[in-house]
Image (tube, rainbow, N blue to C red):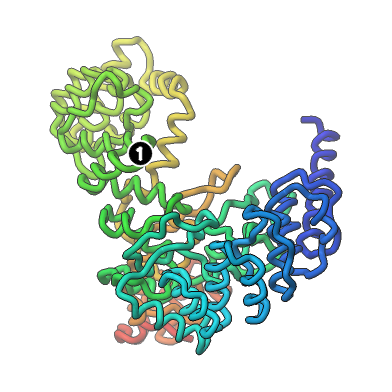
């Protein structure tokens, strides 16, 4: 693209961004509602600004905007004209809650709408209208119970107790689809499958058009139909995970979940391959990082691999195949399995007998490189020789690091027979490998399946859902990754070990290594980041002198200023 065209495109994006921001603030109505982002910004503007975009009611054909106008009217205690079910808003309790009289009038105006009746029950739970809730005579519905618990009002507590006292509770409202279950689902429990009003305060920040990495993603719930877009606010992923949630990581799940966000529980259930917890907790669509955690669970747990093979979409089968190979099972390898569905990483965390890899390579020659790599890891030179693999760079790296030098010598011998150097041979072979395959192998397995080296004990100041697993933003190739082991460290150390206020991380390796060799007044600062007062090269190198004795337990475990 020429510089002039790039400049024109940037200006156009900035202009659209300005118009969308104005709509989001409820200032002006865009002339064209021709993009999803613009429509969602208009909906957000309508919900937060009474009187904004009312001219669209008679001329707009976009149902979500009509629903937003109707929701805003209800929240402003007016009774709108709702022509059909498609114009009935699902959520009319955020950002404001209608008064009790408005809800009564609304129910009288539209007595046949089940969505309205249960929505009114939800609004009662938010505002604590216990008397009106009883009059509605609804099924004891679990999302209304969770909303009532979240609201914290006296009336809400009464509504919660009424629902929880019933022997059978139902799931009627479906916040994932903004619809009602038909028929209602009996024997439901409080399972975190709804969007509380307080959760709607978490936002997606409006993207900067100059930032190519800024991406808006569909939220788990979109009951307000605006994707939670705002110019400011706290993003859901950046909120600290509650102590109650972390406690459930190492305790059995109660039948009714407490008021926790369960996304971290989903990720850890998948990561550890816990079928029961994962089946109960997972959402209809995967959350950020979940795919990578599922892959890790498949590789490390054969039973979880079998369940995923049968229950999840076909894209996970290649990882289940890898687990089956490591178990010595090739019965899955039929003519119907395409080469593109075959796995690459088939030697971690376990290695099969070398003859398994030899047979796999015989049946599918396209697997020779991976099978040979596995033979190196498993120290099976006989099958390796008989496979006669192509000289792939990744296998050479493994061979070069192997204590058994026979594998490296076999690579060198092959290069000699072909009359070229090993370096040239590896380069030619590597260039012939499709980059797409390497990328897929990297994104899907690296950093999650492979555990890496020794665990460096580091404690973060809080646990969030930021970058758990590995799901880089579009256009990013160096996105940071939070190792789930850091969450384990937080769960086992806190509250005995704490990161002092003002710091984000405590590197305990530095504490254990350097504490005996620095002055006593410096020890509380060891391992704390970010620390602008930290000497270049670290505290231990500052003077090289040994401190006055070893630090006590408190100095190491609870560093403080």
The image quadrant that residue 403 belongs to is top left
- Residue at (82% x, 61% y) in the render: 54
Q: Residue furthest toward the bottom?
A: 154
Tell me where residue 263 appears, x and y as whole percent.
43, 62
Quadrant of the snapshot with the N terminus: top right
Q: Nearest the camera: 333 or 165?
A: 165
In the image, taking residue 223 as reference, residue 188 lies left or right, namely left
Give 366 or 501, whichever is nearer the viewer.
Answer: 366
Say above or below: 521 vs 370: below
Does the rendering let one see residue 523?
no
Label 1 sits on residue: 316
Residue 518 screen position, x and y as percent: 40, 79
Q: Would residue 22 be found to the left or right of residue 141 on screen? A: right
- At x 53%, y 85%, the residue is 131
Which element carries disc 1, helix, strand or loop? helix
Residue 228 lies left or right of residue 551; in this view the side is right
- Residue 2, x across and y down, in percent: 81, 30
Q: Please tell me in which quadrant of the rendered image residue 515 appears.
A: bottom left
Q: x, y (%) of residue 53?
A: 82, 60
Vertical relation: 519 (above or below) 531: below
* Residue 377 in view, yes or no: yes
Which quadrant of the view contains residue 365?
top left
Residue closest to the eye, 539 or 254: 254
Within 10 Å of disc 1 (Cα), the crowding (few <14, some 14-19, many 20+) is: some
Position above or below: 438 against 16: above
Residue sitting at 37 percent across and 42 percent down? 445
Residue displayed at 50% across by 56% down: 176
């Amino acid at each position: 693209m020429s510089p002039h065209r790039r400049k024109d495109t940037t200006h156009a994006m900035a202009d659209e961004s300005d118009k969308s921001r104005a709509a989001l603030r409820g200032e002006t109505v865009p002339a064209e509602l021709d993009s999803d982002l613009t429509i969602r910004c208009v909906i957000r503007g309508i919900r937060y600004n009474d009187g904004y975009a009312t001219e669209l009611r008679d001329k707009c054909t976009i149902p979500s905007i009509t629903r937003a106008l109707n929701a805003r009217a209800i929240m402003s205690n007016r009774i709108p004209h709702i022509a059909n079910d498609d114009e009935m808003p699902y959520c009319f309790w955020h950002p404001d809650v209608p008064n009790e009289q408005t809800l009564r009038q609304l129910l009288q105006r539209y007595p046949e709408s089940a969505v309205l009746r249960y929505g009114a029950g939800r609004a009662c739970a938010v505002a604590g209208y216990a008397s009106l809730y009883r009059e509605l005579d609804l099924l004891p519905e679990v999302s209304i119970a969770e909303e009532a618990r979240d609201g914290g009002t006296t009336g809400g507590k009464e509504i919660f107790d009424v629902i929880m006292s019933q022997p059978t509770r139902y799931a009627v409202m479906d916040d994932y689809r903004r619809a009602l279950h038909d028929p209602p689902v009996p024997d439901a429990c409080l399972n975190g499958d709804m969007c509380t009003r307080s959760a709607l305060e978490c936002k997606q920040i409006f993207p900067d058009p100059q930032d190519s990495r800024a991406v808006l993603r569909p939220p788990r719930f979109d009951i307000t139909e605006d994707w939670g877009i705002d110019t400011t606010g706290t993003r859901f992923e950046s909120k600290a995970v509650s102590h109650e949630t972390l406690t459930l990581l190492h305790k059995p799940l109660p039948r009714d979940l407490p008021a926790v966000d369960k996304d971290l529980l989903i990720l850890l259930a998948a990561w550890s391959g816990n079928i029961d917890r994962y089946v109960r907790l997972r959402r209809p669509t995967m959350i950020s990082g979940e795919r990578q955690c599922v892959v890790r669970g498949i590789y490390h747990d054969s039973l979880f691999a079998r369940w995923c093979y049968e229950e999840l979409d076909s894209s996970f089968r290649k990882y289940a195949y890898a687990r089956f190979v490591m178990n010595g099972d090739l019965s899955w390898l039929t003519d119907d399995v395409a080469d593109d569905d075959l796995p690459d990483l088939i030697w971690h965390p376990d290695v099969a007998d070398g003859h398994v890899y030899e047979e796999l390579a015989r049946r599918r020659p396209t697997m020779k490189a991976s099978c040979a790599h596995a033979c190196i890891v498993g120290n099976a030179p006989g099958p390796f020789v008989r496979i006669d693999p192509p000289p792939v760079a990744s296998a050479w790296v493994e061979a070069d690091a192997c204590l058994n030098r026979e594998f490296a010598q076999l690579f060198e011998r092959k290069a000699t027979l072909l009359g070229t150097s090993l370096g040239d041979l590896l380069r030619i072979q590597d260039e012939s490998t499709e980059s797409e395959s390497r990328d897929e192998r990297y994104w899907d397995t690296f950093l999650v399946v492979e555990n890496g080296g020794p665990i460096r004990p580091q404690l973060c100041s809080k646990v969030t859902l930021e970058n758990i697993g590995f799901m880089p933003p579009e256009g990013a190739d160096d996105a940071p990754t939070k190792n789930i082991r850091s969450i384990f460290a937080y769960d086992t150390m806190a509250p005995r070990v704490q990161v002092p206020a003002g710091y984000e991380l405590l590197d305990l390796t530095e504490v254990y290594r350097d504490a005996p060799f620095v002055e006593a007044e410096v020890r509380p600062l060891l391992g704390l980041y970010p620390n602008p007062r930290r000497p270049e090269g670290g505290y231990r190198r500052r003077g090289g002198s040994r401190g006055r004795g070893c630090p006590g337990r408190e100095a190491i475990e609870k560093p403080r200023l």
